[in-house]
Amino acid sequence: MFGIIKNGRPNTQMGGFGGALGDAEIRVIIAFLRAESVRVKAAERKSADADSVPW
């Protein structure tokens, strides 16, 4: 993930941010993305549990 954010992905619209962001800033972004992923999964589980009706 670090390499993709820093250098981009060839032949895609994902450009690199290595020139604009330092390594520490990229690591902060990665930490945020990972935390957000955990939060979204928990919210989806909670929503799925709320949708189920116990008989």
Image: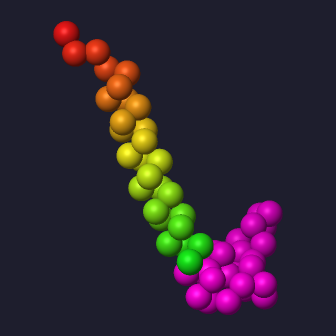
Residue 20 colored in magenta in the image:
yes
Horizontally, residue 14 falls left or right of residue 55, namely: right
The quarter of the rendered structure image containing the C terminus is: top left
Camera-nearest residue between 53 and 2:
53
Horizontally, residue 47 falls left or right of residue 28, namely: left
Q: Taking 24 as reference, is 36 above or below it?
A: above
Residue 45 colored in magenta in the image:
no
In this rendering, does residue 11 appear at all?
yes
Residue 6: x %, y % from top left: 67, 81
Residue 31: x %, y % from top left: 50, 72
Q: Which residue lies furthest to the left in this view?
A: 55
Residue at left offset 36%, top offset 38%: 45
Among the 4 quarters of the image, the one containing residue 47? top left
The quarter of the rendered structure image containing the N terminus is: bottom right
Among the 4 quarters of the image, the one containing residue 10? bottom right
Residue 26: x %, y % from top left: 62, 80
Q: Give the range drawn in magenta.
A: 1-27
In this rendering, does residue 1 appear at all?
no
Residue at left offset 31%, top offset 20%: 52
Residue at left offset 42%, top offset 47%: 41
Residue 13: x %, y % from top left: 80, 63
